[in-house]
Amino acid sequence: MNAKIIFTASIALLLSANSHAINDEYRKLLERSGCTQVSEMQGCDIHKTKEENAKAMATPKAADDATIPNAKQWLATASSGATVAKIQIDDKHQVWVNGKQVKSSQSGGAIKFKDGMVEYTIYPDASSNKDSVWIDNDAGSQGPITAK
């Protein structure tokens, strides 16, 4: 009897896991638009083309593009080249993601912080030979962070 319950629960678990996958239509919209799931949440329109989204991003500076005095600029990008986040870190290691200040911590020469489901790790010292990266734990995607 217990074996039947475990078997049934296992099948239900497997079937429910597939329901969270990106469907083919949504994937095509993402590819056409140049958006990622992360950039879509930040205003990238999946119903526009890559060119239209690039033009919209090039419009006059928004409040989240404001520069923080004495802050180093970083850019988190997706594999498609789309911007995931604009990051600024000042001399006191205070961090802003898309103009919003976030809490950060330092560990092993890295500055670590989180914005929503995305975790960022930046190595400000270029001599560390470690790559700065972002990881979206919800979407399962990741990409590089580079100094501007």
Image: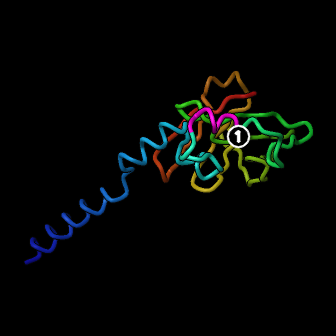
Front residue (pair 11, 131): 11
Q: Report helix, strand or loop for mark 1.
A: helix
- Can you say whether 70 is above or below 39 in the image? above
- Can you say whether 80 is above or below 86 in the image? above
Instruction: Please identify the quarter of the rendering in which residue 147 is found.
Output: top right
Residue 146, position as x, y percentages in the image: 67, 29
Most extreme residue toward the left is 1
Amino acid type at mark 1: Ala
Q: Is residue 45 magenta?
A: no
**Colouring rule applied to residues:** rainbow
Front residue (pair 48, 88): 48
Q: Is residue 35 left or right of residue 100?
A: left
Q: Is residue 75 left or right of residue 35?
A: right
Instruction: Please identify the quarter of the rendering in which residue 35 is found.
Output: top right
Residue 67, position as x, y percentages in the image: 87, 40
Most extreme residue toward the bottom is 1
Residue receiving disc 1: 56
Question: Which segment is the magenta one?
Answer: 49-55
Is most of the magenta stretch helix, strand or loop? Answer: helix
Count the numbered circles shown: 1
Residue 59, position as x, y percentages in the image: 78, 39
Instruction: Please identify the quarter of the rendering in which residue 28 is found.
Output: top left
Quick one: label 1, few (<14), some, or many (20+) residues within 10 Å? some
Front residue (pair 60, 69): 60
Question: Which quarter of the rendered picture does the C terminus lie within?
Answer: top right
Q: Residue at x 39, y 47 (%)?
A: 25
Question: Which quarter of the rendered picture does the N terminus lie within?
Answer: bottom left
Residue 40, position as x, y percentages in the image: 58, 49
Q: Residue at x 64, y 33 (%)?
A: 145
